[in-house]
Structure formats: structure tokens, C-alpha cells
């Protein structure tokens, strides 16, 4: 039995540190000890503490900024590995790619931890609106935050809990990406793809009946110099694309004196 106890002690010695030094007196402890030795008043001690806390706040902010700058130097680009598609109200089709929060976390977490940075979320709900705050902190104690609010996601046939979960996930991703300044890109686009691409059916051209009805008025306006042909074409295109023939007819009209 004694031999067994000796073995257990030796095994423990391999795991636990030996001769661990006693912790030194902290900086604030030294300051307070010096002030007490000089018979400082309570008011003086309180002022000393306030000055110390202010100096620590400044140091913590400086350390945070340095760590964040180093993080940004090594910050990875997050790939958009997820795809989504849905039908629009106009009968078209909306398709887009995005980086999930799992993609973002997997990319940034190793670099964050390397420089003593971490993040956490706070969540609030007021009626149908959900608010997510992403906090980014450093081991020094300094932190910053980014807040976003959005309505419950009632698209599709989601249950009430699914609506909340969808919005929470989206806001977490947006606030985390926003506070870090992370860039998201696709694998095959060299860094640029619109987040949403409309694939609806092409819009019909501007009605030729309306064009012919308004042409005399537009002609008079161009000839008098009140409007240019390009301006009228832009107005037409804001309603529906002008046909090449319509554009040609308008550009053929010249202001008087030309």
C-alpha cells in the first residue's frame, strides 16, 4: 500500500507544477501600501484609486487597439459557401450566396485567440423586433460592441420559434462581420459577386402606343430646349426599357437653331 501511494504522488508531480512561487503584490497593492505608509487620508486613497483605474483603462484600450490591428493584418477572407434561392412576388427568382456564421467563426476564431481577443452576443426582443449586440473584448479588459435590430423572419412557413432563430442567426452574423470588418467572397469570383442576383423574366418594353401619344409633346420639349432627348429616354427607362426604335426617334429630334 505505501508503494502505491508513492506512485500516485509521483504521477501527480508530473501534472501539477512544483514549487509554485507565491504571487507578487499587485501594482495597485503596492500603490495603496505606499499611500498607507505615508498616513494618507481616505480621500487621498480614493483619488489614487481613481487615477489608477483611469490609467488602467487607457492601457487596456491601447492593448486592445494593438491586438486588433494585428488581427486585421492576418484576418482571413471568409468564403461564401452557402446558397439560397426563393421566388419573388413579381414571379421572378432571387438567388444569392452567403457566408454562414459557422463559416465566419471557423475562419476568424484561431486568429482572434492568438491575440487575446474574444466575442460574445447579447440578445433582446421588443415585440416582433429582435436586437443583437456583438461584443468584442480583449484580455486587458477593454471591449467594443456593434448592435443591429431586425424583425422576425416571417418568410416561408416558419414557426414562431423558427422565425426568431432565423433572425437571430442573421443578426449575429451581420454584427460579427461588421465589428471585425471581415470580407466575404466566393470561391470562383475573385472576390466579387452581388449578394443578390435577380433572375426574373425580362421586363416588357415601353408601350409603343404611349410613346406615339406622347411623342408630339416630347418633340416640342426637345425643340424648345426645355428637355434633352437623353433626359426623356431616362424617364422612359425608369418605367420600362425603351426600344431601339424609340431611342432613335428621340435622338433624331434636334433643338431649334442646331
Image (cartoon, rainbow, N blue to C red):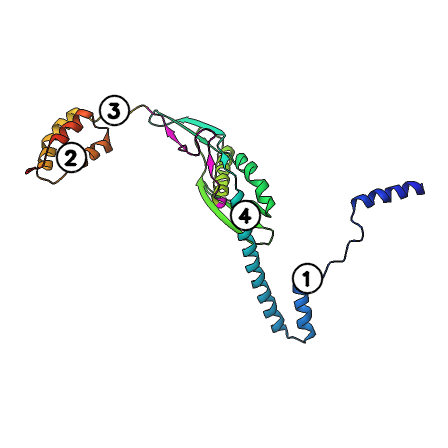
Q: Which residue is mark 3?
A: 204
Contact flag, marks 4 and 1 (Cβ < 8 Å): no
Please state the horizontal and vertical placement of residue 169, each as a whole percent of the image.
Answer: 51, 37
Q: Earlier in the sequence, mark 2 or mark 3?
A: 3
Which percent across, then down, holds residue 216? Answer: 9, 31
How crowded is the residue under tag 2: few (<14 C-alpha within 10 Å), some, or many (20+)? many
Q: Secondary structure at mark 4?
A: helix
126 left or right of 116? Answer: left
How far apart marks 3 and 4 lie (CA) works out to 53 Å
Residue neighbourhood size for the residue with mark 1, other residues' Cα within 10 Å, grouped as few (<14), some (14–19), many (≥20): few
User: For mark 2, what is the residue?
Assistant: 229
Q: Are marks 1 and 3 in contact (CB under 8 Å)?
A: no
Which residue is located at x 17 percent, y 29 percent? 247
Q: CA distance from mark 2 to mark 4?
A: 55 Å
Give the mark toward the camera: 2 or 4: 4
Q: Tag 3: Cα neighbours inside 10 Å, few (<14), some, or many (≥20)?
A: few
Q: Earlier in the sequence, mark 1 or mark 3?
A: 1
Please tell me which residue lies in front, 152 or 2: 2
Q: Residue at x 54, y 45 (%)?
A: 71
Residue 175 visible in image: yes
From which residue to which does the magenta span run? 179-200
Q: What is the C-alpha distance between the residues marked 1 and 2? A: 79 Å
Give x and y (percent) for residue 12.
82, 44
Give the quadrant of residue 97.
top left
Dot placed on the residue nearer the N-terminal end, 2 or 4: 4
Residue 72's x, y, as percent?
51, 45
Instruction: Give the labeled residue for mark 4.
Output: 70
Q: CA distance from mark 4 to mark 1?
A: 28 Å
Magenta span dominant secondary structure = loop
Q: Which residue is mark 1?
A: 26
Q: Is residue 207 visible?
A: no
Q: Is residue 158 above or below residue 74?
A: above
Amino acid at each position: 500500500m505505501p508503494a502505491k501511494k508513492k506512485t500516485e504522488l509521483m504521477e501527480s508531480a508530473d501534472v501539477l507544477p512544483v514549487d509554485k512561487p507565491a504571487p507578487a503584490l499587485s501594482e495597485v497593492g503596492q500603490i495603496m501600501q505606499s499611500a498607507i505608509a505615508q498616513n494618507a487620508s481616505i480621500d487621498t486613497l480614493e483619488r489614487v484609486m481613481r487615477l489608477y483605474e483611469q490609467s488602467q483603462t487607457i492601457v487596456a484600450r491601447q492593448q486592445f487597439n494593438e491586438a486588433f490591428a494585428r488581427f486585421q493584418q492576418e484576418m482571413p477572407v471568409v468564403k461564401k459557401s452557402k446558397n439560397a434561392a426563393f421566388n419573388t412576388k413579381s414571379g421572378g427568382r432571387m438567388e444569392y450566396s452567403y457566408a454562414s456564421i459557422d463559416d465566419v467563426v471557423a475562419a476568424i476564431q484561431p486568429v482572434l485567440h492568438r491575440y487575446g481577443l474574444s466575442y460574445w452576443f447579447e440578445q433582446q426582443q421588443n415585440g416582433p423586433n429582435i436586437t443583437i449586440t456583438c461584443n468584442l473584448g480583449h484580455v486587458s479588459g477593454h471591449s467594443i460592441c456593434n448592435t443591429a435590430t431586425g424583425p422576425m423572419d416571417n418568410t416561408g412557413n416558419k414557426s414562431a420559434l423558427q422565425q426568431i432563430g432565423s433572425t437571430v442567426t442573421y443578426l449575429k452574423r451581420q454584427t460579427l462581420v461588421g465589428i471585425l470588418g471581415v470580407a466575404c467572397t466566393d470561391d470562383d469570383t475573385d472576390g466579387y459577386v452581388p449578394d443578390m442576383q435577380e433572375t426574373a423574366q425580362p421586363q416588357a418594353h415601353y408601350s409603343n402606343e404611349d410613346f406615339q401619344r406622347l411623342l408630339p409633346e416630347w418633340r416640342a420639349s426637345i425643340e424648345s430646349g426645355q428637355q434633352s432627348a437623353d433626359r426623356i429616354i431616362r424617364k422612359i427607362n425608369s418605367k420600362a426599357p425603351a426600344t431601339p426604335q424609340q431611342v432613335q426617334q428621340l435622338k433624331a429630334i434636334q433643338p431649334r437653331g442646331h
